[in-house]
Structure formats: structure tokens, C-alpha cells
Amino acid sequence: MGYARLVRQTAIVVEDDAIQRDMIALLLEEGHFNVIQCEDAETAALAIKMRHPSLVVTDVKLTGKMSGIELARLALDCDPGVRVMVISGLPSVGALPDGVKFFPKPVYPPALLRELAL
């Protein structure tokens, strides 16, 4: 096993529903990510700028002034190589930035794990 396999990447999970946030964080931690949990986009924006995550998972509707789609754009502006997944219970979320993956709620663990394996 090479050194690169031992390094845990950072993921940021942004969800105002604590149960959903904890479930996604647990899946990512089992997938060998260090997870930072945020309940609003403003906190997540600071974490993105300071921690340079390799993955951001965000809900579309968040408390505060910024939406998850705006946060996705900010994350990609900070690092065009970051993987961004947007989740929502809404049937339509509008246009997503290029490369951003969409998952409807409820998020099913197998679907999320399949995407992480790519």
C-alpha cells in the first residue's frame, strides 16, 4: 500500500438537517475522508477557503444568504478540481455548474458510494 492511500482527504458536508448531515458524514468517514460538517453555506465557504477540500457535498436550500448552488460555484472558483455533489428534495434545482453531480433526497448510501468510487 502506497503512502498516497494512507492520506485521508478532506470532505465538507453542508446540510441544515442534522440527521441527513450526520448520515452523509458517517458514510464519508467510512470512505476514508476527514469530514467537516457545516449547517450553513457561510460557514462552509470559510472552511472551503481554509481547508481546501477534495469533496464538497451540499444541500441546495440552506439557512443563511447563500444557496448550495452558489456555494458549489464558490468551491469550484477556489479549486476547479474539487468534486462537488449537490443534494435536494426539490424536483428541480435549476442549472448546476459544469461537473457538479446532483442527487435527489433522500440520498441513498449505495448511490453516494458508487459516485465516490469513480
Image (spheres, rainbow, N blue to C red):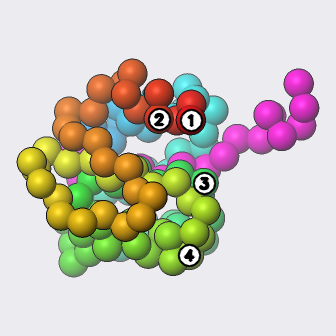
Q: Residue at x 40, y 56 (%)?
A: 100
Magenta residues, start to end: 1-17
**Please, what is the three-letter code of the amino acid marked with disc 2?**
Glu
Q: Are marks 1 and 4 in contact (CB under 8 Å)?
A: no
Q: CA distance from mark 1 to mark 4?
A: 22 Å
Q: CA distance from mark 4 to mark 3?
A: 11 Å
Q: CA distance from mark 3 to mark 1?
A: 14 Å
Residue 118 is tagged as 1
Viewer-nearest of discs 1 and 4: 1
Badge 4: residue crowd in 10 Å (few <14, some 14–19, many ≥20): some
| Pointer 4 or 3: first along the chain | 3
Q: Are marks 2 and 3 in contact (CB under 8 Å)?
A: no
Seen in the image, is 98 located left or right of residue 9? left
Q: Are marks 2 and 1 in contact (CB under 8 Å)?
A: yes
User: Percent x, y for residue 14?
Assistant: 35, 54
- What residue would you read off at disc 4? 78
Badge 3: residue crowd in 10 Å (few <14, some 14–19, many ≥20): some
User: Percent x, y for residue 111?
Assistant: 37, 28
Viewer-nearest of discs 3 and 1: 1
Residue 54 is tagged as 3
